[in-house]
Image: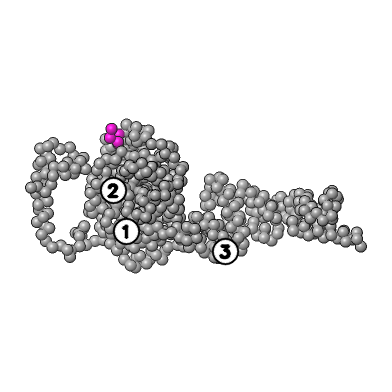
Amino acid sequence: MELNAQRSTLNAQFEAVIGLEVHAQLLTRSKIFCGCSAAFGAPPNSQTCPVCLGMPGSLPVLNRRAVEFALKTALALGCDITSACRFHRKNYFYPDMPKNYQISQYELPLAWRGSIKLPADGATRRIRIHRLHLEEDVGKLLHAGTLQEADYSLVDFNRSGVPLMEIVSEPDIRTPEEAGEYLRQLRAILVYLEVCDGNMEEGSLRCDANVSLRRVGSEELGVKAEVKNMNSFKNVQKALAYEIQRQTQILEEGGRIVQETRLWDADQELTLSMRSKEYAHDYRYFPEPDLVPLTSSPQRIDEIRATLPELPQQRRARFVREYGIPDYDAAVLTASRPLADYYETVARASREPKLASNWVMVELLGHLNKDGRDITESPIPPAELTAMLTLLRRGTISGKIAKTVFEQMYQTGKSADLIVKEQGLTQISDQDELRRIVEEVLAAHPGPVADYRKGKVQSLTFLVGMVMKASRGKANPQVANELLIARLKGEESGGNG
Amino acid sequence: MMKITLAEVEHVARLARLELTLEEKERMRAQLDSILSHIDTLNELDTSAVEPTSHVLPMTNVFREDEATPSLAQEAALANAPDRHDLFFRVPRILEE
């Protein structure tokens, strides 16, 4: 079937109904049921033990911090915590899972019924969270070629048993863009809570989507397809747009949607049916006999609630209120906690929150993005940027020079003071020196001087430019401007008198 | 009339990756039927006021602290592998033809 994934206008007869399942790897030191390191990137099968290899007789013991992280997230999402929850075995055969079951949660998940607010045209859209539960990750498979072609596959069990938190939304999402926004908000919350690093490309944040269509106005849900293997925000949006188109076309042609799992192919930009096995979803869940129930008392929940940091949306609103910056800027600056901390440090220390916002957003983020660096890798620490802004505020350097100084600070790591001193970049506000330059410029450009006197005001801009040029950008433009006017007008009045 | 059909026996066998002969399937069907009949006997009890029991011990919240402890050496981890490739476990083709 030929489809154009770019064509995103949905036939007005149908609306899309989308629910997202997000798996977030928790930032614990050790795995969820054993003491093996949960660190990413170790040599294959170097972080395994009888528990995470599924050896007979080995017993799982729950990681306290994994539970704490999941509770923290549940509270930040406004969920109800299940006072006593359990773990279940989800039984299926796949070579990435040595026990032939995954320890997960089934009818009593850790938490239920939360929500995420999405900003939408001044209002907010609330996407409900259905449930949040804990489970173990599975091993990583490497196929010889693609899964379809491979004669054999290789297994690395380092990831087996790394704690995962699964967050399932209600089918409240209507467009690919909204799905992207939901993911961005959720990611920001997880990163703020410091429970997940949020890296989709490395797989610490994964997203599957359930997509169906229904006639506009209908409350009934259509047959859904589950889309997997979307490893970036961009891919999630593209895959959903494609899938909506595919289903629209089938329905328009009078066909029926088959319930199935489809894999997003990022190279071809389409979803492909994963040849489903008939019994794939018969998991025969039963209570995990090796793990006792998990309870959370009201006191424990209060203790954890007290550790919640200010969340991104609250911080964004506060930045607008407290620092008087536009909402858009506040959204950019609160995208991650280290970035928001960086900005806030500079805004407070420099007492120039708006100036700080411009310099962090435009210059600093511009440079960092170009180099593919994170704010935590900034060669300019907040105190140094503050010092530069102070020089700018006091008029020691001009805005133009500030850009040069910033560039050198970024490249060399030197302080603004040192760069200004070493290169004599101090702005010339000294009247005598500027007057001398003004005289030179007036003498060199009699044409524009005459024009100005004839009433051509624009000539002044040219003359100020010449003064700036003659001073190699160091003249204080305001002072130069005043001196020029005084001189031009003074001479005029002198001539008449 | 048995409580379980031959098709259900085949379904369960397939889930457990068991290949059974027709004779074995019939034997399993009879055994599973007797188990289900026994459950029927248990179902005569009124348990509406009883919480489902997943564990018999009155214990909750058994935790370990989040500390990384030494893992197996790679060679030890791979020692029981039916097949391997360098430091990976090697498994046969996954998808059915």
* Marks 2 and 1, how far apart at CA: 16 Å
Task: Name the residue carrying label 2.
Answer: A102
Image vertical order of residue A285 relative to residue A272, above or below: below
What chain letter is assigned to the residue under label 1? A
Task: Name the residue carrying label 3.
Answer: A323
Task: Name the residue carrying label 1.
Answer: A110
Q: Are marks 2 and 1 in contact (CB under 8 Å)?
A: no
Amino acid carrying mark 3 in the image: Tyr
Please rate how many residues cluster around mark 2, counting C-alpha atoms within 10 Å: few if below 14, some from 14 to 19, many from 20: many
Tags 3 and 2 on a common chain: yes
Amino acid carrying mark 2 in the image: Gln
Q: Provide residue A242's location: percent of width, then percent of height.
A: 41, 43
State left or right for residue B29 relative to residue A408: left
Q: Nearer the viewer, residue A99 or A36?
A: A99
Q: Does the stretch in magenta take in B96?
A: yes
Image vertical order of residue A17 relative to residue A302, above or below: above
* Marks 3 and 1, how far apart at CA: 38 Å
Question: How many numbered tags mark residues here?
Answer: 3
Amino acid carrying mark 1 in the image: Leu
Q: Which residues are magenta?
A: B92-97
* Any part of residue B27 in sight: yes
Please rate how many residues cluster around mark 1, counting C-alpha atoms within 10 Å: few if below 14, some from 14 to 19, many from 20: many
Q: Tag 3, which secondary structure?
A: helix
Nearer-N-terminus badge (3/1): 1
Q: Tag 2, which secondary structure?
A: strand
Tags 2 and 1 on a common chain: yes
* Marks 3 and 2, how far apart at CA: 49 Å
